[in-house]
Image: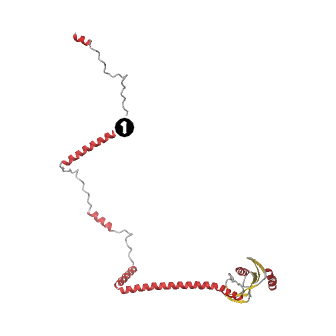
């Protein structure tokens, strides 16, 4: 009875449960993906380190134990040896030449030439005097070749010089004759084919050039001082000489009067005439001579 009364008169104890009104509820921490990956990586590294340590311990323990004899299935397989027949066959194949390397058999003539060359070479090596003589002959041949080449070059140069002198000789002859006659004469740059200057005759204020061909035909080109013009030439010289048998051609500022193979014109205070016995020159040739002066 005393116990029951004591229990009934016991003080009421306060509750130990937290009052949520004054204490906040704990919120769980949310991890990011990077944190999760980092934690997984740390775990894997720790696991790998532990496995490496265990493997190293096992390896050290196996080294300490005595070597056990290997079983037949654990014995290493020996390298297969080549058969002697195979070795011989491979040697023969390597020694065998390809068709490109095989040499063509020499003919009898080639063998003969080769033997002669080898004999001459051996003789020359044995006889140094002949070798020196051969060298001397070769040197003399080279010197003769150089001399002949120099002579040919000199002949060529002389021939070219003579050719140009021959080309300029007519103009030189005309220039000398013009100085003697006192007239400023000129040599035509055009002469009909087959004709060449044969001689030059000079008088006072008159110069005559004689042209001949291979067939014997000839014509004379005369230059003399004159004060006539084309009209005075026609009235004083052409009409009395040619009558009405002439033609007038005007070319490059010149008035040329032509009758057969004869022609006349004036230019620069000079009277030009071309005379020939036969009709050996055409109108085109006469005009070409006139315009080339």
Closer to the camera in the image, 176 or 264: 176
**Residue 23 percent across, percent down from the top left:** 36, 24
Can you tell which quarter of the image residue 8 is in?
top left
Protein image colouring: secondary structure
Q: From what the image shows, is residue 188 above or below residue 49?
A: below
Is the C terminus in the top left, top right, bottom left or bottom right quadrant? bottom right
Q: Residue at x 21, y 47 (%)?
A: 62
**Residue 220 percent across, percent down from the top left:** 72, 87
State the SS at label 1.
Answer: helix
Q: Is residue 63 left or right of residue 131?
A: left
| Total tally of numbered discs in the picture | 1
Outermost residue on the top side: it is 1
Q: Is residue 196 visible?
A: no
Label 1 CA crowd tier, 10 Å (few <14, some 14–19, many 20+): few
Q: Residue at x 30, y 66 (%)?
A: 91
**Residue 240 percent across, percent down from the top left:** 82, 85
Query: What residue did someone put label 1 on?
Result: 35
Closer to the camera in the image, 181 or 141: 181
**Residue 141 percent across, percent down from the top left:** 45, 85
Outermost residue on the left side: it is 66
Q: Is residue 7 visible?
A: yes
Q: From what the image shows, is residue 164 above or below residue 51?
A: below
Closer to the camera in the image, 149 or 170: 170
Q: Residue at x 35, y 39 (%)?
A: 38
Is the N terminus in the top left, top right, bottom left or bottom right quadrant? top left
Can you tell which quarter of the image residue 265 is in?
bottom right
Can you tell which quarter of the image residue 275 is in?
bottom right
Q: Is residue 93 left or right of residue 213?
A: left
């Amino acid at each position: 009875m005393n116990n029951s009364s004591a229990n009934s008169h016991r003080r009421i104890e306060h509750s130990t449960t937290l009052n949520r009104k004054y204490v906040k509820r704990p919120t769980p921490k949310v991890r990011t993906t990077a944190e999760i990956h980092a934690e997984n990586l740390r775990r894997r590294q720790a696991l790998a380190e532990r496995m490496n340590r265990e493997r190293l311990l096992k390896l050290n323990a196996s080294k300490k134990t005595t070597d056990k004899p290997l079983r037949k299935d654990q014995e290493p397989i020996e390298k297969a040896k080549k058969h002697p027949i195979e070795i011989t066959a491979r040697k023969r194949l390597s020694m065998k030449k390809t068709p490109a390397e095989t040499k063509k058999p020499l003919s009898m003539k080639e063998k003969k030439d080769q033997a002669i060359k080898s004999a001459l070479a051996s003789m020359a090596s044995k006889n140094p005097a002949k070798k020196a003589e051969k060298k001397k002959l070769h040197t003399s041949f080279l010197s003769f070749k150089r001399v002949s080449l120099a002579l040919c070059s000199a002949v060529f140069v002389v021939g070219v010089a003579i050719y140009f002198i021959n080309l300029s000789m007519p103009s030189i002859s005309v220039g000398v004759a013009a100085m003697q006659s006192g007239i400023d004469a000129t040599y035509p740059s055009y002469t009909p084919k087959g004709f060449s200057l044969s001689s030059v005759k000079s008088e006072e204020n008159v110069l005559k050039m004689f042209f001949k061909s291979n067939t014997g035909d000839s014509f004379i080109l005369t230059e003399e001082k004159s004060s006539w013009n084309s009209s005075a030439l026609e009235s004083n010289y052409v009409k009395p000489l040619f009558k009405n048998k002439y033609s007038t051609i005007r070319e490059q500022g010149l008035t040329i009067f032509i009758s057969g193979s004869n022609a006349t014109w004036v230019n620069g205070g000079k009277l030009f005439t071309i005379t020939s016995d036969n009709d050996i020159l055409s109108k085109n040739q006469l005009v070409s001579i006139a315009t080339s002066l």
